[in-house]
Each structure stands twice: as structure tokens, then as C-alpha cells.
Image (spheres, coloured by chain):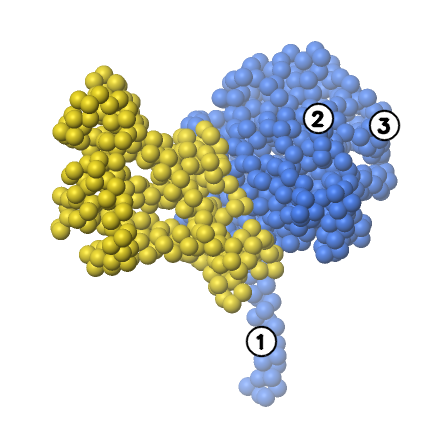
Amino acid sequence: MADIKVASETGLDVVAVTGRAPARAGAWTVIRRFCAKQPLGAVGGGIMLVMLLTAIFAEPLSTHDPIATDAANTLARPGADHWLGSDHLGRDIYSRIVHGARVSLIVGVLSTLAGSVLGGIIGLLSAYFGGKSDLITQRVLDILQGLPLLVLALVMSAALGPSVQNVVIAISVPIIPRAARVIRASVLTIREMQYVEAARALGIRHLRIAFRHVLPNTMGPFIVLATAQLGSAILTEAALSFLGLGVPEPYPSWGRMLSVSAAEYAQKAPWLVLFPGVAISLAVFGSNLLGDALRDTLDPRLRGT
Amino acid sequence: MSACGVLTLLVLGPVILSLVAIATPAVSQTPATPKSGGVLNAMQREDLPQGFNTHETGTISSVWPVMPCFNNLVLFDPAKKVESVDSIIPELAEKWSWQDNYRNLVFLLRKNVKWHDGQPFTSKDVKYTFDVVREAKDAPAKLRTSPRKDWYANVENIEAPDPHTVIFHLKRPQPALLLMLASGYSPVYPAHVPLAELRTRCVGTGPFKLKEWKRGEYVEYVKNPDYFVKGRPYLDGIRYVVIVERGTKYAALQAGRLDVAFPGESTKTVVDQVKAAVPKMVVDVVSQNVNDNLLMNVTKPPFNNVKIRRAISMAIDRGAYIKAVHQGGAVVGASMQPKPYGVWGLVDKDLQALPGYGKPAEEKEKAKKAMAELGYSSSNPLKTEMATRAIAIYVDFASFVINELKQIGVEASLKQIETAQWHAFATRREYGLGANLTGIGVDDPDANFYENYACTSPRNYTGYCDEQVGKMFDTQSQELDPKKRYALVAQIQKKLEEEAARPMMGWRLDYFAQWPHVKGLVPHHNLYNYGRMQDVWLDK
């Protein structure tokens, strides 16, 4: 914790220490301290870890082929053969949820990363150079931010068509202005600091100062932002899939598992909507808990509150 | 009471009670005297895609809410569930007769019929309508598209010798022409109203006049006081309420906000739920005359290879498909509506001899072997794309087939197409495989074969074109002996399935639901022909 604080206060030279020192001090120690101070965050982290492992080991973990239909076992109740039941086409819900974790995580992480990185770069350059370019950039971002995340994602997805890469694009674009705003706010403070002025005085090129000296000091807010957006991205993917604009059938996606057909059979076979709903809720809950805990940990103003 | 009396009572009591129980519904179903008045609230599954221009459309979403505005020359009797040449009744035509051995069809029209705008209806309107639909060289107007122009490919010309007589002159005998004219797809248009206007307003001769069409919300009709059938319609009006989401529309029906369902929309599962909540809801199980069919683009490799098409057809277990995708709410059949719902379906023995209709495991093995001979297997799959409409019922169909094909070495990815683009997309044949639904306007081979398999038809989505099969269509069309015609039609069906021209997955059943106070609305074994609403009344 102390290392991180030093890093944010002294900038460039200590950044390297931030990366190395805690690892040497013992990852377990850091994790233990984090768990002690942020128990809810630890629960969130645990959920996300389970989700990550499920996504990685989806093949060995699943009991059936997630797209294999079975007319003899349609709408089967949860039991020994189908742990979480089967859907109206006889597909195994448990295996579909396990494989759905992969889709949710890939889409969630990729879109969050793409949106946050792109938004971060825009925010960095906009704030660092300031002036008219900052003004114009901010007005464009105002327009983008004026549209709710889901609405913008819906428009993008409808225009691009349903596929994994298009869903990633559709979700990452609305994240850009949010990321840009957060990073810009940090950079506006950092660019006035003495070490940045010193770098300028030494004649270092602007882009080098921006990326080498300013950007690393925005990592705290960046991590918080990315974690917070992850839950939102997972939820948006589920919403897009629910509306038929997400990852196409027959590949499983939690949101699509809740969509029209499932709703039709929900009274007769509630497990069709129950388990994917629980999976979405847990994933969003987990990422939000983790995001909140990281924010509390990394933001000096909130530390100790 | 003596022991004998008690015994008699014990034995006969239940029998008598059973008879009373059986008789009671019959008594309650005895037709009461129709009452006039009231507004029928009908379900509408989506907005009208082509407005009121039925001749430009190919969907029940248009036909159902537009039928009350128009009339045909003749119509399938709305009161009879099974449609045949014997159930045809007069509408704008008072009488008709075949002449010259089914080469000329003469209609004598009703007099004093007026369009909703007050103009008189004459034979000119009939000639105008069907010249436009068949895209005659001298047609005075042109539709954007005429999906059923091939229904009238055999019409040489249409003559209107006087204001109340119309003669259809045919190139060769075609008794089925009368059936096609009796379909909900065959309204007579006003010659004095431009076609483009019919996309936004309705001027017909029908029992109801358009009051308002609020796009995306409702279509509202009021009674036509000048209707040519005296005492009809009974209703003061009809309101078709557009509700797209399935759960919402059935909640509206269940709550009594709607009086009747939409044809073809009620699946077994949905209706089971409605019936459980409202036991008195009346549910009629009828065939839709709509089939789920697999499109294979025969104009491009690899599906121009009949061996691949046949293997794909053999790979799909129809019984499992119906059980999984329709929860049992469909029946297996070839290219004509299966018996007992349709007249022309193949008998079971013939059906089971066709590729894909035998024992599923054996058929799948044959398919695997055929694909292996062509060099495809699960380790070296044939990769293709399966296109379908972005609607749940289509997507379920496609998902099921994709899994079946995976087992014989075909790897298909799903591509969903928006509804508005689907028909144009299929017409342009921008696909390899496609999961499609086709409704047949009339249970007659002419209506089906010429529309969906004729080389020049815009609705021939697969591009299947065989001159010899075309000749077989013509031969059956002019055959006057029903038995001989049935044999010819059976032969064509076998040929179409053997060549996997458009493999059939199943024929859909409709679980049409309506409140018991709705009287006179009899669902047919065909979606398209019972929406006139002239005899419908409310027993409230």
C-alpha cells in the first residue's frame, strides 16, 4: 500500500518500485491485507476468479456439448443427467452457462480494455495539449456521453450486425468518453506537477512526456475505472444478446439464454431463466464489489473510509 | 327403494350423468341468434409491412388485418374449417361457371356494389386487379413486387364484356384457378385508386371501412353500412392491436384486453399456459398450411451438388425437430400439407421411403457416408453459413439444424437477418443454407408449386429449376380426374424431396385461442383465408 502511495506522489522514478516491491514483499501478504481490509472486495475478487477459471476450463468443466440438441430430453428438470436442467431444444443449461462465462468474460474484458485504453489515450492527449483540441474533443465526448451506454451499444450493434467482434466494438465505444473524462481529470493535475515541468525544461518531446511520465501516474484511476466498467460491460452484453443483437446463436451467451424462447417456457421450466439470471447477477455483483474495493484501496482520498 | 332399484341407479346413474355431461357442451354450443354491435379487439403480431396492399405482400401480418376491408370474387366459406373446391362461396361474383373444358372461367358479378369511397364496383376493377397481379403486358399499373404472379401464369387474358361479367381465358385447362381466387391473397382492388395509396389507406368493398391506421399501434375499422350483404357485418368495428412481444400479447389475451389471438402465433406451450390461467378460453387446433423448410442455394457450389443436398436432408431427424422446436406442435410432411389437414399430402408409406424421412439413425449414417464419399467429415468439415430471420422461431429452427449437420461433417455458422430484409435477401439468394418458413395461400398444388418451385417465380428462393419438373407441374395442373391428379402430385413431391429442392422439416399447427364470447370465427386449416370477419359477433 505504502509503495503505491509513494508512486503516485513522486512519479516516474518510483513507478518501477510500484511494480516490483509488492511482489517481493509477497503476493500472499498483499492479498491477505486486501482481504482483511476489503472483505467484500475479496468476495468480488473470488467470484471473478471463479468466473475466469470457468471460462478457461470450460471444456473439461462442461458435461455436455453446449450446442447439442436432444429431443428426448427437452425441458428436463435439474437432475443427475442435466445438473441445471435442459432447455426447450434439450441443450444442457449447466454446460451452456459454463461456456457462456467464456463469452461474457471475453466480451466484457475486451470491450472494457478497448474502451478504457482508447478513452484513456484520448483523455491523456486532450488534457496534456489542452487548448482548442481539448475543447473540441470534450464537446465530441459530451455528445457521446449524452447517449446512455445501452442505447449507444444498441445502435452500434444493430448497425454492425450480431457477432462477437461487433459486440466488443459496440460496448467499447460508449466506454470511451467515460474513460477519457476520468483520465483527463487526472492528467490535468499531473501535467502541472514539477517533474513534468522539469521534463519539459529538459527538452523531452511532448508525446514522450505524456506517455512515459504522465500516463503511468494515472494507472490508479485507470484500474478502478476498468474494473467498474467490467460489470457494466458484462451486463450490456447480456442485454444485447437478450435483444438478439449480441453473440449469435447457437453459441451460448447468458443474455441470449434469457431471451424470447426462454421467456416463453419460463412458467413451465423456470430453470431456463433462473440459472443464467443468477450467473449474470453474480458476475456483475462480483466485478462491482471488486471495483469498489480497488477504488477504495487505490484512491488516497477514500483510503481508510 | 328396492335393492334392484338401487342397483339400477348405481349402474345407470353414472351412465346418465356421463351422457348429460357429454350433452351439456353441445347444448351450450348450440348457435345462438347472432347479436349486432360491439368492437372486436384482435391481436396483431406486427405492423402492416406493406400497408393494405395485399397483392404486394407475402405475410399473414398483412393479410389478416386487411381482409375485412376487401372482397374477393369468391371465398372459402369462413364457417368451414376444411377448404376445398366444394367450400367456395360467392362474394363479388354472384355466379360462376367453367366453359370450354376448364379453359374459360366466367364470373357474373353482383350489381349495386360500391367501393368505400362511393364509386361503383364493375368488371373493370376485376380485370384491372388481376392484370396488375399477373403483370400482363398491357397492365395499367405495376406493383412493386407481385409474389403470386405465377398463380396466374396460365391466364391468357381477362375480358370484361360488360360491367357485370368477367371472363378469365386460360392457355390450358386449370381447375385450380378458382381455388386461388378464393384465397385471402386474392382481393379485388379499386381501379380508380392508385396502387401506392393502398400502402397507406384502404378502399375496398368489404364489410368494414378503415377508420384509422396508427403505425405500430393499431388498425381500426368501422362497420360498412352500405355492405352488399344485408344484415352484415354484425360487429360495429374491429381494432387490431399491434403487440410485438409474445409474452405481452398473450398476457393481453389472458387479461381480456384482446378477444382473439393472431393466426399462427399461438404455440402449444403458450396456449397451455393461457388455458391453465383461463380454462374457459376456446382453443382450436388447426394446421397453418405453413411449413418449415431448409433453403439450399442450388445456384452456387456446394449446394448445386444434389448429393450434398440429399445428405443434408437425410441428416435431419424430422421427428426430433418437431418434438424439440415445436414441442410436438407440428406434423411431418413433404411439400404439400400432410393429411388429414390437407388433401394432397403423401401417405405415410410413401413419405417414409423418402430421403430423410426413414429411421433417423439409419438416415444419419447414410448421410455421413455420402458426405465422406465427397471428402467431408467432422475432421474436415464443409464450412458454410446458415442464414435466418432474427426471430426466435427461426433461430430455434436454425440452431437445431446446425447441430444435426455438425454430426455429418457440415459446420454452419448462424447469420441472422432482420425481418424487413429477409425476403429480399432470400430472393437475391445471398446465402448458402437458410432456415425458412413458407405459408401456402391455398392447399392446392398449383398455388404451391408455381409459387415456390417454378423457375421464374420470385418466391423460388433456392433457385431450383428443372424443366422436366416444370412440365410435371403443368400436367397435374390440367388433370381433371382428382385421383390421377393426386398420383401426379405425389410423384412431384417425391421428386422434389429426392432432389432436396427444399427439404421440409415439418408443417406447423396453430393453437388458435379466442374468448368464448367471440362467435362465428372459425379457424381454417390455412392461415390466410378466414379473416373476413363478416359473420363474427360478440355474445356479451
Callouts 2 and 1 close, C-beta under 8 Å: no
Compared with residue B263, is residue B352 higher up or lower down, i.e. above or below?
below
Q: Secondary structure at mark 1?
A: helix
Callouts 1 and 3 close, C-beta under 8 Å: no
Dot placed on the residue nearer the N-terminal end, 2 or 1: 1
Distance, label 1 to label 3, CA atoms, is 61 Å
Count neighbours of disc 3 (C-alpha within 10 A) and say few if under 14, some if 14 to 19, many if 20 or more. Answer: few
Which of the numbered marks, if any, corresponds to residue B13? 1
Q: Which residue is mark 3?
A: B101
Q: Secondary structure at mark 3?
A: loop
| Mark 1 belongs to chain | B
| Mark 2 belongs to chain | B
Dot placed on the residue nearer the N-terminal end, 3 or 2: 3
Residue at 63% in and 51% down = B322
Asked if one can make out residue B493 in the rendered structure from this viewpoint, the answer is no
Asked if one can make out residue B385 in the rendered structure from this viewpoint, the answer is yes
Distance, label 3 to label 2, CA atoms, is 27 Å
Q: Mark 3 is on which residue type?
A: Asn
Q: Is A147 situated left or right of B190 in this image?
A: left
Q: Residue furthest front?
A: A202
Give the color of chain B as drawn. blue
